[in-house]
Image (spheres, rainbow, N blue to C red):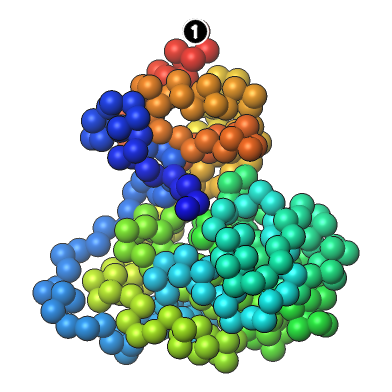
């Protein structure tokens, strides 16, 4: 089982701190979720239907012709490898931990690669390529032009490019959502999620964007009703609320800049990140993770990278608490 951020119950048991006393900065989920109104009773009483306006809202938001709703992008991550015959697959390393076991479980031979190798000559040696843009956990970004060039090279031997854009909503000009599956990018698949930017991780709403034939096969594999009716209701509203989206972008970008400055002022200048998290590489990662956890502050520790990922504090009390802990660390 791949470890993820947000395991507050485990942290509470490990450190004997009540769960409500924690400041959770481990997930990269926006601390200001979309304000979902009261769910209509019909959403709980009736099965979801495809003609409820969700598809149209997703088309407008992503600029995509054929968005397929999925039970969080994780559902597509697990299912997509099963649609392809076993082949060598290149995965960016480091990256999201669920990619590798999903491709391996479907019989593919995985080749972890550095980004420069993946997008240059190395891409010719694999059947398919999957990466996140921006990358998780370090926030590395890949220019759309470079990705499309890699997709063109993959297409020469019927390879596919799968791009997970879970952290792309606050990024301008980075997404391939509008071109995935179009005549100029037939072998491009894009995954999107409402878990991070919209702060609705618990709703488990995602979309797969690509050519209709492949999406039809994926839909058949996933089966009926991939999204619960209440989740569809919330997602439709969030995707259509352009004023809230613009305000959320500004709020996230400002908070990310503030977090970077706070960390740098305490000797931990981030080496990467997005509008939703900052990535810090330090030899003290393990000790700092434990130091913060003993004070009820949970960040994500990447032991193999000796690095930490800090999510955004959600209010002034959280900012003050993090700043006080960093001050204590510096003065210890």
331 or 254: nearer the viewer = 331
Locate residue 27, reporting x and y percent. 44, 45
Residue 81 in sight here: yes
Q: Is residue 311 left or right of residue 280?
A: left
Tell me where residue 86 sits by quadrant. Answer: bottom right
Where is 57 relative to 73, above or below?
A: below
Residue 174 in sight here: no
Query: Which residue is the site of mark 1?
Result: 332
109 or 238: nearer the viewer = 109
Where is 253 relative to 269, above or below?
A: below
Label 1 packing within 10 angstroms: few (<14), some (14-19), many (20+): few
Secondary structure, mark 1, is loop
Locate residue 167, reporting x and y percent. 53, 56
Where is 231 relative to 266, above or below?
A: below
Q: In this view, does 159 lie to the left or right of 50?
A: right
The residue under the point 42% across, 77% down is 69
120 or 198: nearer the viewer = 120
The residue under the point 79% across, 70% down is 126
Locate residue 187, reporting x and y percent. 69, 81
The residue under the point 57% across, 54% down is 96
């Amino acid at each position: 089982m791949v470890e993820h951020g947000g395991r507050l119950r485990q942290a509470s048991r490990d450190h004997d701190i009540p769960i409500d006393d924690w400041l959770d900065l481990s997930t990269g989920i926006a601390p200001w979720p979309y304000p979902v109104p009261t769910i209509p009773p019909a959403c709980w009483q009736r099965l979801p239907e495809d003609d409820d306006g969700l598809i149209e809202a997703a088309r407008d938001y992503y600029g995509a012709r054929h968005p397929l709703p999925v039970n969080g992008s994780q559902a597509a991550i697990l299912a997509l490898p099963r649609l392809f015959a076993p082949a060598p697959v290149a995965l960016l390393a480091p990256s999201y931990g669920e990619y590798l076991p999903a491709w391996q479980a479907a019989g593919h031979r995985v080749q972890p690669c550095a980004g420069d190798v993946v997008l240059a000559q190395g891409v010719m040696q694999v059947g398919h390529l999957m990466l996140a843009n921006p990358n998780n956990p370090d926030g590395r970004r890949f220019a759309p032009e470079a990705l499309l060039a890699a997709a063109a090279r993959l297409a020469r031997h019927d390879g596919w490019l799968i791009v997970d854009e879970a952290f792309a909503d606050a990024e301008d000009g980075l997404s391939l959502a509008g071109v995935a599956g179009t005549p100029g990018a037939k072998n491009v698949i894009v995954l999107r999620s409402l878990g991070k930017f919209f702060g609705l991780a618990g709703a488990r709403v995602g979309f797969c964007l690509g050519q209709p034939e492949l999406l039809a096969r994926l839909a058949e594999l996933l089966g009926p009703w991939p999204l619960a009716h209440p989740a569809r209701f919330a997602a439709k509203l969030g995707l259509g609320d352009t004023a809230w989206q613009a305000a959320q972008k500004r709020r996230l970008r400002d908070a990310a800049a503030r977090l970077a400055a706070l960390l740098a002022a305490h000797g931990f200048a981030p080496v990467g990140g997005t509008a939703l998290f900052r990535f810090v590489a330090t030899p003290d990662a393990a000790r700092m993770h434990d130091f913060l956890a003993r004070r009820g502050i949970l960040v994500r520790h990447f032991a193999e990278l000796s690095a930490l990922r800090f999510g955004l504090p959600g209010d002034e009390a959280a900012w003050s608490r993090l700043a006080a802990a960093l001050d204590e660390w510096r003065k210890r």
